[in-house]
Amino acid sequence: MPTESRLTRSGRISGRSDLFPKLVSMQKLIDAQHFAVYRLHGSGLPHKQRLVCELDNWGSANSVVGKSFVEVYGEALIEHVDKSLLPLMWNGRDSDSTAETPDFAAFTQRLKPHLLPFAGVAFPVRLGAVGNGYTVFTAKFMDLSSDMIVELHGRSCQLMMELLSLDERRSQAAEALSEREIACLQLAGDGRISEEIAEKLGLSVHTVNAYLGSATIKLDSVNRIQAIAKAIRFGYIS
């Protein structure tokens, strides 16, 4: 297996935007047209779960593509990931819209063909209750070697681990920050200095600086500016 596909800890990513170059690189490797990352939400029986798109490059012109994909194959994907980790492939409506892997066919499974205007492959990832899902690539035509399948499946697992890591860090930050810390960060992000924040919130300047200092530490930031940037990225302030 290529070194890049090993599930080792990669460099720390700061946001979902850092995952897009990785997906684009995977897309280019197999000359795919689009990619999407789906995760299963809900718990219990498969019929109570649903696929939610976390990242994609369908684009506004193809906004219905993701919805169509879930409508057509969503139930099959939800059922599959609970039973198998073999990649799924399907053919498009046209006779020349196919996804093939001649030397690896025994280690993939086929979805019902001719239901969508494109062919594709879906790599299942199973990392626990909140880490199950798929990385999907679509194209008019695909001819994938066994090395490509193995490489992309490994990268899909790594990418899902990084997505979970982002969610975990966001959750930890949300629990750590108090309402006062968030309020001070919001006003600081709006360009207010400590004196203005203190007047706005009815606090002393010393208390405001203390809240901003503690928020900076909790967000693992080196200064107030970085703390504001992280708070915006995590969605706690606008």
Image: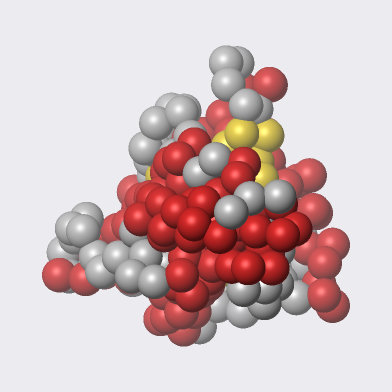
Question: What x and y, as percent, mark residue 100?
Answer: 48, 66
Residue 176 seen in the current view: yes
Residue 84 in the image: state x and y as whole percent: 40, 34
Kindly identify the residue that appears in the image at 66 percent across and 45 percent down: 52
In the depicted structure, whether residue 154 falls above or below residue 130: below
- Between residues 157 and 145, which one lies in front from this camera angle? 157
Q: Position of residue 229 (x, y in %)?
A: 53, 71
Residue 3 as seen in the image, left or right of residue 146: left
Q: Residue furthest top?
A: 44
Point 68% across, 21% down: residue: 48
Name the residue: 67% across, 73% down.
192
Q: Is residue 147 left or right of residue 196?
A: left
Q: Quadrant of the C terminus?
A: bottom right
Between 196 and 157, the one nearer to me in the picture: 196
**Quarter holding residue 217:** bottom left
Q: Residue at x 46, y 46 (%)?
A: 173
> In this orientation, does residue 87 appear?
no
Comparing 69 with 63, the one in front is 63
Q: How many marks?
A: 0
- Picture layout, residue 39 above or below residue 23: above
The picture places residue 237, in percent across and down from the top left corner, at 66, 58
Q: Looking at the picture, does residue 35 appear above or below residue 203?
A: below
Colour scheme employed for the rendering of this structure: secondary structure
Q: Locate the N terminus by quadrant.
A: bottom left
